[in-house]
Amino acid sequence: MAKMATLVDAFTSFHPAGGPWNFSYGPPSPVPGRIHLHCAGTYEGLLTGSTYDLTDSSLLAEMVSVPTGGGGTRHTMLRAQTDGNDYIEMGCVGDRIHFRQNSAGTLTTWESTVYDAAAHRWWKLTHVTGTGCMASVSPDGVTWTRFGAPHTPSIELTAMRVHIFCGYYGTETSPPDAVVANVNNPPILTNAPAGAVTATGGAPDAQPRPPDVITGSAPVTRPRPKTGGRDLDDGPRFGQYGGYGSTGVTNVDAVEALVGRTVEIASDYLPHDSWSWFDRTRMRTEQLDGWRTWRDARPGSGLAYGVPILTDSSTGDFAGVVAGTYDTSFTAAADALVESGNGDAVVRLGWEPNNPGIGSWQATSDPAGYINAFRHIVALFRGRPGARFLFELSSAVGPSGSITTFDDYYPGNPYVDLIGLNVYDVWWGGTVPPATRWTNIRTAGMSIDAVVAFAASKGKRLVCSEWGLYGPGDAYNGGGDDPYYIDRMYEYFRDNDLYYQCYFNWDWGGGVLADFPNGQAEYVLKFAPPA
């Protein structure tokens, strides 16, 4: 059964016959980008022909206009239903917005408050296993506020139709239309500012992540937001990894001094040798609070944070992840990020799954298990109050084992926001000239050209969260002091739609930037701000 979030419609075209929707009651009036539901005593609405699974998923819509007031019987509903007697819904009745469940014909109002057309323009129903069903509202589809408390449903959520309708049941005089747009299709805002607008009270809620497969409509091109005062079309954000916690902060500061440029996104990793690292206090004390202080001194800056899917003590236990064995650890990690003020981090979940040597979560023999574990953790992270994470799937260069394409372990568009490739100046085939090594990096299987095409096919932005020079003398056959590689990477960033790039300035066997004087000089030349 497809998850509820995979139903996405911007109503750029409307084809009820053969599309996702059927009419319920009278037929609505489509206009480009919106559906008008006439508020009539005979009702008008849309009902999906297919069913969807709401568990660990969400349903949201932009309620552009909702008829209120009058005789108090005007109502507009966003409903996930198994039938007319079992459903979860958000709806406006008269002048109030409600969050309700109907179970076996018994209607229970879980939450209710006065409707505010501006603050309540977007509505969202969410389910998180272990937490329950939640309703959220938003003025812009980006910053969400939970509408009351979570509630435990008493109906089955695994096969539900979406029903959106409007009408009245009393005496009303010429009520206006309800206007609906963007089902599961909110605007994409990367690195949204910390804090949420409080509309009806309650904790800030998780920002939804829109799938990019439009069902029944053409894809919508959304305007690029500005982040930290700079247009994202200006080029990828300038990033650095310099080590764990405070060591990383110190080393990133040193690169800023070297290049004469503010680092716009820093990178760090949660260690994977033990689950004991997944501790909220330890994470904040040793890493995350320090990065928040660093970010506060650089308004608009971000954090990319690597989170392992498994630790060394649980190698290959993807089934345990899906079964919830490690949920306490993952929710602790998500909460530590949010509580430290890094709830907008790019989460590099289970990086390099196509690398058999990466660690306990390598997926070369079980890509399906990796996919299921990735999805489970994303749902957990998104369900934490205040979470506004972006999720990155970053790969190594090259196929391995049963993996021959990026699609082999891709969790799906609803679970991935950014697609990355870690690109080091290495060649496993022996010592070769720089141009030959670069051609391999560009054109070999699962390389730069391949990931550019793959990201475009998924409608996702690229990142390069690890790249760097690597010294010669071991099996990686690094190019050493190679300014040619620096130039080619600069061109790759310049010519493609990357959200950020992050030089891996830590010695994992091949040296750091300062070990390569010619490469470092070229790095400074290429990445220094314009004179």
Image: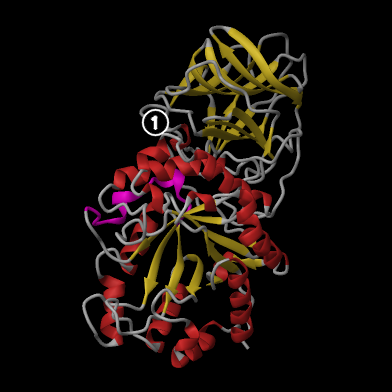
Tell me the residue at 62%/46% (across/down): 335
Left or right for 284, reference 52 = right
Q: Quadrant of the C terminus?
A: bottom right
> Is residue 312 depicted above or below 512 in this figure?
above
Q: Is residue 35 magenta?
A: no
Q: Which residue corresponds to the image point at 68% horizontal and 59% vertical from the top-left? A: 289
Q: Where, quadrant-wise, is the N terminus in this rendering? A: top left
Task: Tell me residue 525's x, y (percent).
Answer: 52, 88
Relative to 13, 343 lies left or right:
right
Circle 1 sits on which residue? 19
Q: Which residues are magenta?
A: 402-418
Q: Nearer the viewer, residue 123 or 487?
A: 487
Of the residues shown, which amino acid type is indicated by label 1?
Gly
Residue 515's place in the image compared with 408, above or below, is below
State the residue in front, 101 or 318: 318
Q: Tell me if I can see residue 185 in this picture.
A: no
Please check the rendered image and state whether residue 417 is part of the magenta-colored stretch, yes or no. Answer: yes
Q: Position of residue 61 (x, y in %)?
A: 58, 34
Q: Can the viewer see residue 89?
A: yes
Element at badge 1? Answer: loop
Position of 116 relative to 484 (above/below): above
For the residue pair 408 and 20, the one nearer the viewer reads as: 408
**Where is residue 390 drawn, in percent x and y?**
53, 52
Q: Nearer the viewer, residue 234 or 317?
A: 317
Among the 4 quarters of the image, the one containing residue 486: bottom left
On screen, residue 128 versus residue 481, left or right, reads right
- Image coordinates of residue 17 in percent, x first then y, are 38, 26
Residue 321 quadrant? top left
